[in-house]
Amino acid sequence: MKTVYACFCTDVIHEGHLNIVRQACKYGKLIVGALSDKALIRYNKFPTISEEDRIQLYKSVDGVSEVIVQDDMLYEDVITKLRPDYVIHGDNWKKGPEAAIRKNIIGLLSRYGGELVEVGYTYNEKVRKIDQRLRERTAMPEYRRRRFRQLIDITSVVKVMEAHSGLTGLIVEKTVVEDDGKLDQFDAMWVSSLCDSTDKGKPDIELVDMSSRLRTIDDIMEVTTKPIILDGDTGGLTEHFVYNVRTLERMGVSAVIIEDKTGLKKNSLFGNEVIQTQESIENFSAKITAGKKAQLTDDFMIIARIESLILDRGMDDALIRAFAFVEAGADGIMIHSRKETPEEILEFCDKFRKKDRKTPLVVVPTSFNSVTEEELAQHGVNIVIYANQLMRAAVPAMQATAEEILRCHRALEADSRLMPFKEIITMIDEL
Ligand code: SPV
Ligand code: MG
């Protein structure tokens, strides 16, 4: 008897899946692959039921003869091992990021004469509602919050991109590229104090207050599902910080990063060009400990950011602080630098990792931007934050357009560089 293979990555079996099973049975014995938690999480398809429950769910469907676990979005391992006569899939993957998976499968099947069977995707109101409900469930605070820790556990580098509005959140949520048969996307969002302030036309000096920052987070949360890391500046007064930890945790934010500065905070990229005061180890440790005590779940992370390299206080000071802040309860360490090359960051990471192999390390390669994610991972970095690139891309484009319209006294000349609104709104989901 011929074998047919289908991969499922759903928490709910609907008409569309049943149709695939029905069609598959016409070709032979159907083996279903359950995409593993690891593979789902990596590709932002966070499961809302356990891997074991999904396996049982698929097994209970009439016509499914066997269920195995598929450990990657690409079918390489499964196809090599099973050599199915057919792979069956809905026909809704010819365009967009999934096209890369399709192309990869066709290549794998052609090696031994296997065939791809594509069945018409079931579009109806019921199926649409189920898909939408599943997506919304993953946006609920308890699911979103814990995802950041899940990502740290399963990926070599968690890639985080800055978002400061619903629209930039959608860009981080939805941008997917196909590179060499692999799909890639950002894992999480960074709500930067610099970009959130700049978007409001204000300086990055903790002037934009927490109520406003929470409003930005809420705008982003309303339209996205990926985990959120807040740039919490200095964390403010400890007495206020503990309340903010509770609020962020309740909203579904995954982590807050606070920096060891006190007094009027200025942006780190100014370094010593402006007056900035580093907080004492004792006071900052007490703030971290108070924050950890205030949180109610095990999911939420408080990450300590060390400004010693930014303020030219030296490597030893940075390391002493890092170990002290971990001791005080920090769930991660962010080390920052404004050097144009990554040497001091890599030196810090190597020295930190010699003593501490597990506390997550975060870096923000804005000025030392030649270093790759892979190189950073080799030195023990777990999280890479692209902290301001989207805003820096948008501002010159807007300025050039404003200037061109002023110069030409009409919009015609600028128009060819502009995205039609019809295209922009394809990003916006309708309920
Ligand atoms: C931010 O994005 O606001 C940061 C990172 O704090 S940096 O601007 O590099 O200090
Ligand atoms: Mg900041």
Image (spheres, rainbow, N blue to C red):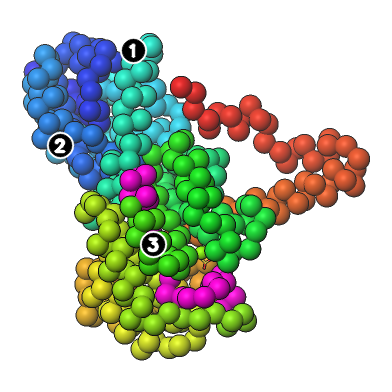
Q: Return the x and y of residue 94 as percentages of the image width and height.
A: 42, 26
Callout 3: helix, strand or loop? helix
Measure how far apart labels 2 and 1 are at the Cα level.
Answer: 25 Å
| CB at disc 3 and ligand 2 closer than 8 Å | no
Residue designated by label 3: 241
Name the amino acid type tagged 2: Glu
Label 1 crowd bin: few (<14), some (14–19), many (20+), radius 10 Å: few
Measure how far apart labels 3 and 2 are at the Cα level.
Answer: 37 Å
Q: Return the x and y of residue 250 as percentages of the image width and height.
A: 33, 46
Q: Nearer the viewer, mark 3 or mark 2?
A: 3
Name the amino acid type tagged 3: Phe
Measure how far apart labels 1 and 3 are at the Cα level.
Answer: 45 Å
Label 2 crowd bin: few (<14), some (14–19), many (20+), radius 10 Å: some
Q: Could you tell me if residue 421 is visible in this image?
A: yes
Name the amino acid type tagged 1: Lys
The relative height of residue 245 versus residue 222 in the rendered view (above or below) is below
Q: Which mark is residue 51?
A: 2
Callout 2: helix, strand or loop? helix
The numbered mark, 3 or 2, whose residue comes first in the sequence reads 2
Horizontal side of residue 173 vs 358, given as left or right: right
Q: Which mark is residue 126?
A: 1
The relative height of residue 385 versus residue 251 in the rendered view (above or below) is below
Callout 1: helix, strand or loop? helix
Quadrant of image for the N terminus: top left
Q: Residue at x 33, y 52 (%)?
A: 246
Which residue range is magenta in the image?
A: 247-271
Query: Residue 208's image quarter?
Result: bottom right
The relative height of residue 358 versus residue 168 in the rendered view (above or below) is below
Q: Nearer the viewer, mark 1 or mark 3?
A: 3
Query: Residue 359's image quarter?
Result: bottom left
The numbered mark, 2 or 1, whose residue comes first in the sequence reads 2
